[in-house]
Image: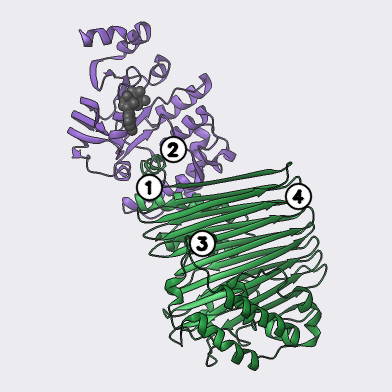
Amino acid sequence: MDLKEKLIASFLVFENQTDVDTYVHDIRTDAIKTFEEKGFPSKKEEAWKYTSLNSILKQDYSVFPKQENALEYKDIKKYFIHDIDTYKIVFIDGKYSSHLSQTTHDGMDVCLMSAALSKPKYRLVIENYFNVAATKDSLTSLNTAFSSEGAYIHIPKNKLVDKPIQIINFSTGNESATMVQPRNLIVVEENSHVQIIERHQSLTDNPVLTNSVTEVFTKKRAIVDYYKIQNDNTNASLIDNTFIKQLRESICSVHTFSFGGKLTRNNLNFYQHGERIDSTLKGITIIGDKQHVDHNTLVHHIEPNCESHQDYKGIFGDSATGVFNGKVVVEKEAQKTNAFQANNNILVSDKAAINTKPQLEIFADDVKCSHGCTIGQLDESAMFYLRSRGIPEKEAKALLMYAFSNNVLDSVKIPEIKQRINKIIANKLGVNIGFDL
Amino acid sequence: MLKIENLHASVEDKTILKGINLEVKAGEVHAIMGPNGSGKSTLASVIAGKEDYEVTKGKISFNDEDIEELAAEERAHKGIFLSFQYPVEIPGVSVTNFMKTAINETRKAKGLEEMPAKDMLKLIREKSELLEIDRKFLSRSLNEGFSGGEKKRNEIFQMAILEPQLAILDETDSGLDIDALRIVANGVNKLKSKDNAVVVITHYQRLLDHIVPDYVHVLYNGKIVKSGTKELAHELEEKGYDWIKQEVNA
Ligand SMILES: Nc1ncnc2c1ncn2[C@@H]1O[C@H](COP(=O)(O)OP(=O)(O)O)[C@@H](O)[C@H]1O
Ligand SMILES: [Mg+2]
């Protein structure tokens, strides 16, 4: 039985044992039908031309965790941003860990999707937002069909959330191969501000496949800063489907730091429903071995006077491969749109490769749109300049790579994250940095 | 200190240096002049260890040690410094961080501890005052958006900090106004002692008025075709290079 058949077969069992109301039940039932029709995406589809799921779909994943697994905080502390106080929503093999979490219902909800999907008091929010921004593509539908657990965050009006929220999904590897499908819903009401950090972390070398869906709603003048830290083990793969619906004058930024994992696909979608919206999509990818990272972004400009800023940097070593597929749609009504997109890459090895493709679909006439992508090696004349001042080759390379990815970190608003990312980059490059940026 | 014998160097099968002989002793100042495209910058880069150039024949030694096989950074650690004709712009690396890294990597290579932050600040402040460099300048990205003159002054600032034994200044004077020229020359003269040496590559007498050479060489078509004392520089300034070309081609 292949993975598709296995998933479809287990749907009924799953549906019977999950506690949801009929509204959600109907959505799930529709979703499994969609998945059954479409199946997993193949390289024949334009959006998947350079990313093949074949090798990761071959594993015999257990699709439901058979047992509850526990972890000691001291063993996994390093995966948290732990030098500052944060709210935490932590899952182990897809199951909520109250022991490791720090949630709240005090003036806002930072809690669990399972509760939101089953308890009547959340019913209205679920009907208004659940599966509203998400699209009906096959992987998102698959997640929707099995959606039962994840983070549920609802921030009421005029609230500046006092500390960042971390969403962390651990995989213990206690099963020989595990598939998990977290489902997150984040609603930020008018004038509120929240910072979110998301991480998926496998703790062994057993294969893990995560197919996650996150829906974010930023209402009028809300501000959301979202950080995705992707630095997973060698056999962990992640398909991240994130859908962000912004209302007028809201500001939302997503920084994606991709440093690890076997295969990572980021489907990051922004929809601008209102005027004077600002969307920022930034990323640093530094990978080696045979790792693969695919950024598939969409910014949909629907109304006038909005901005979007995309800046993705990639450094690829060994036989690593990357994809950047950035689509910007500017509708006819969306006059005075400013849309910027940049994707710059350095290939450190002859065997590394990047496919980069901007796609601009502009139907308005009074807009400023720019895009640029570069693929290069490290600048030889810069290398000689640094080395002629006594900086050895390895350190010179590191310095140039730091400098190259530097401006992406400028917009990171949490200093501890900036430091953490700096450290990860230093580790990746195998140097001890004696300088700050 | 520096001894170059019958040096041939080529890039992509094109021979640029065709048998250079040059000896520079401690305490000396040498000027190298010559028409554009003669190979002056190539010679400077080959001494500094640029890997694009292949030494096909001949020898370069520094303090009686063969250095052809040494990497650029190893030559820097031994005290060779090149002030670039075209300093490279490096966005994202500030002047200060660049200098800190250069100082500490050089110290590391010599088996020394990192320089304490306090001493580092003092050193950088002292030398930036010497070169009349504004402090704001130090936090800017290296050479990015600097004017021609600022780039050259920044080169000499780096030289003043690294205190090399042999400094090669490749057209450091071009792009400098009179004041900047005086400041730069002053910076070079401050470094000069009986233990180190300076090679000045230039087209003009005006820098040599400040940094007075003991020897002047003319490089033409990959060879040193004439050597003399500082009077030769005056003669070249007056008469240009045509008479030299004629002499050589005759
Ligand atoms: N990296 C290179 N690749 C190809 N040709 C070069 C390179 N560097 C120098 N040359 C050539 O070598 C000759 C000497 O150049 P250069 O050393 O810059 O002369 P100068 O500094 O005396 O003006 C020129 O003809 C130049 O075009
Ligand atoms: Mg030159």
Q: Is residue A21 above or below residue B151?
A: below
| Tag 1 and tag 4, C-beta contact below 8 Å | no
Asked if labels 3 and 1 share a chain, the reply is yes
Q: Mark 3 — residue?
A: A294
Residue B199 shows up from this direction: no
The residue drawn where x is 22% and y is 27% is: B23
Quick check: is the Cβ at mark 1 less than 8 Å away from ligand 1? no
Element under label 3?
Answer: strand
Residue B142 tag number: none
Residue A228 x/y as whole percent: 58, 67
- Estimate the x, y position of residue A194 in percent, counting from the top left: 72, 67
Q: Nearer the viewer, residue A225 or A134?
A: A134
For disc 2, the marked residue is B158
Residue carrying label 1: A391
Q: Are marks 2 and 1 in contact (CB under 8 Å)?
A: no
- Does the closest atom of ligand 1 sit within 8 Å of the Cβ of label 4? no
| Of pointers 3 and 1, the one earlier in the residue sequence | 3
The residue beneath circle 4 is A334
Give the CA separation, mark 2 to mark 1.
13 Å
Query: Which callout, 3 or 2, points to the residue nearer the camera?
Result: 3
Where residue A218 sits in the image (x, y, percent)? Answer: 75, 65
- Could you tell me which residue is drawn at 66 percent across and 66 percent down? A243
Query: Label 3 amino acid?
Result: Asp
Colour representing chain A: green
The amino acid type, in three-letter code, at marker 1 is Ile
In this picture, residue A112 sits left or right of residue B164: right
Q: Nearer the viewer, residue A171 or B201?
A: A171
* Amino acid at dot 2: Gln
Q: Quadrant of residue B226?
A: top left
- Which shade is chain B? purple
Closer mark to the observer between disc 3 and disc 1: 3
